[in-house]
Image: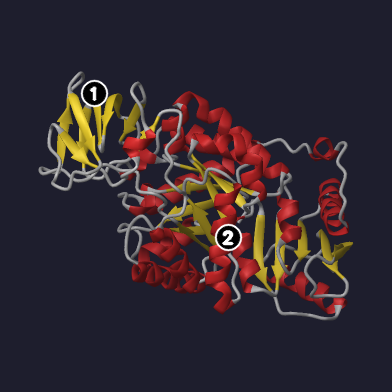
């Protein structure tokens, strides 16, 4: 595989069959997302087991991401399943209403809305397709006027323009779902709607406690989809292992026009802080029903790749779409073409850089050496995967192979840009480890006689954070 950018695919009715899932993995899926907004706990456990079985069958390293639902900021259900709102008509959002909704109003899953809004506020429903302005608030009722109408159906989401809804990032359901996700030891836990670093720290603590019986600690992904999160990006990143640029809800709160620049800023900040970045939402939306993407979607995916994102993500396209496998194939091809056109400016990237750690300096030295020598591969013998992560933060055409004896580190590295994770036996002897690493890559066809490669490791072997050696070798 020469593609550096990873692909995250969401499981759903269209992709939960073993045969389809195997084809998805073979088409290029590196991370499988389990969306906890849908399904029961046992559904997710069964799907996680199926993913691992299919990954083993096709011989591919695949990471599992559990995506928490977060607060249900939604309208309730309608008597007829939906209503048609006309511009200028009144419409009541009633937190106390228990009966199904009608053309005059509807109940709320989010009971705090009357205390979060005031006259003049703008509410956006169904991803911003319907716009309501708040006229007045009386008790549990929010009286609004329809500014932009349309069809409003059951359980559609509510956003407040500019943000300001007080819903906590972690609900009671999320806390139970964290226990479920830890029971199958998900590699990544995505937290919906965090507003600050505290939300991420709390989620990590809950996950670590729930994972203690298996001695498992997942990597934490902050989904940036609230306007309140933007001023706290740096702190949120410090408290997380990566971010997801969740463009749907974010665009509704900050406006569509602000999102592209925010996307670039977030990806750049993540890379500078040695964190992971995932770009998500509507990347190949038209392929839910069409066999080919639009030109705009092709450009969108390509631009995210050129921005340096670690992964591009598919949601309904693979969960419920007609063409899940074809969508992944198209996305993989777009990413590959964009990477071929990408300029490598490694010398400029290293200008004025200072590294305070020996292991990080070795990682950077391996990149610089491999780039200028024209090496065919960079091999990082790593316990935790940190060396491979640091290497993956810089653009380089040389593939990085993360070799580890820990299965958890192997699957986690499946999300790192330009990193190919491989499980290898534990060696306490350095020379044996180096020889085994070369043998594995030759067996895979990644190296052949006469090829040069850079390899990093630590002495003594087997200690996380101990990388202190760089060696340049030629395959004999």
State whether residue 394 appears in this view: yes
- Residue 212 location, quadrant: bottom right
Residue at far front of view: 139
Eyeballing the image, is 428 above or below 408?
below
Q: Which residue is mark 1?
A: 146
Q: Quadrant of residue 9?
A: bottom left
Q: Is residue 300 above or below residue 390?
A: above
Q: Position of residue 219 (x, y in %)?
A: 60, 60
Numbered disc 1: secondary structure: strand
- Front residue of this view, candidates 165 and 154: 165
The quadrant of the picture occupied by the C terminus is: bottom right
Q: Is residue 62 visible?
A: no
Secondary structure beneath dot 2 equals: helix
Q: Nearer the viewer, residue 134 or 475?
A: 134
Instruction: Report whether 377 appears left or right of 82.
Output: right
Outermost left residue? 80
Total marks in image: 2
Residue 415 lies, in percent from the top left, at 59, 56
175 horizontally vs 16: left or right = right
Along the horizontal axis of the image, is 71 left or right of 464? left
**Which residue sits at x=77%, y=63%?**
380
Residue 281 picture location, percent across and down: 44, 41
| Disc 2: which residue | 204
């Amino acid at each position: 595989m020469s593609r550096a950018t990873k692909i995250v695919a969401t499981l759903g009715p269209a992709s939960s069959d073993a045969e389809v899932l195997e084809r998805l993995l073979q088409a290029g899926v590196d991370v499988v997302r389990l969306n906890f907004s849908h399904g029961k706990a046992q559904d997710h456990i069964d799907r996680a087991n199926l993913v691992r079985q299919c990954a083993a069958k096709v011989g591919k390293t695949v990471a599992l991401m559990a995506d928490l639902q977060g607060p249900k900021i939604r309208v309730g259900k309608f008597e007829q399943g939906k209503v048609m709102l006309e511009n200028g008509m009144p419409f009541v959002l009633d937190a106390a209403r228990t009966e199904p909704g009608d053309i005059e109003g509807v109940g709320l899953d989010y009971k705090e809305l009357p205390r979060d809004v005031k006259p003049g506020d703008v509410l956006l429903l169904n991803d911003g397709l319907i716009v309501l302005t708040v006229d007045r608030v009386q008790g549990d009722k929010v009286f609004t006027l329809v500014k932009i109408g349309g069809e409003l159906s059951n359980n559609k989401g509510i956003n407040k323009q500019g943000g300001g809804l007080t819903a906590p990032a972690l609900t009671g359901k999320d806390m139970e779902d964290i226990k479920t996700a830890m029971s199958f030891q998900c590699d990544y836990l995505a937290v919906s709607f965090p507003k600050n670093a505290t939300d991420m720290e709390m989620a990590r603590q809950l996950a670590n406690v729930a994972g203690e019986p298996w001695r498992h600690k997942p990597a934490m992904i902050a989904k940036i989809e609230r306007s309140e999160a933007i001023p706290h990006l740096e702190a949120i990143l410090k408290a997380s292992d990566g971010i997801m640029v969740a463009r749907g809800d974010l665009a509704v709160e900050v406006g569509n026009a602000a999102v592209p620049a925010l996307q670039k800023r977030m990806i750049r900040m993540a890379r500078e802080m040695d964190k992971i970045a995932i770009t998500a939402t509507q990347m190949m939306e038209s392929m839910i029903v069409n066999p080919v993407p639009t030109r705009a979607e092709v450009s969108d995916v390509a631009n995210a790749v050129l921005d340096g994102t670690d992964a591009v993500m598919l949601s309904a396209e693979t969960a419920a779409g007609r063409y899940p496998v074809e969508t992944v194939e198209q996305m993989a091809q777009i990413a590959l073409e964009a990477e071929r056109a990408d300029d490598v400016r490694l010398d400029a990237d290293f200008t004025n850089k200072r590294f305070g750690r020996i292991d990080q300096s070795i990682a950077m030295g391996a990149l610089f050496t491999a780039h200028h020598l024209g090496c065919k591969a960079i091999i990082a013998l790593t316990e935790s995967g940190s060396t491979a992560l640091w290497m993956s933060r810089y653009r380089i055409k040389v593939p990085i192979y993360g070799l580890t004896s820990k299965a958890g580190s192997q699957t986690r590295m499946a999300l790192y840009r330009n990193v190919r994770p491989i499980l290898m036996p534990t060696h306490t002897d350095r020379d044996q480890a180096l020889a085994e690493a070369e043998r594995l890559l030759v067996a895979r066809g990644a190296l052949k006689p006469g090829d040069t490669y850079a390899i990093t490791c630590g002495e003594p072997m087997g200690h996380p954070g101990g990388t202190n050696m760089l060696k340049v070798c030629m395959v004999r």
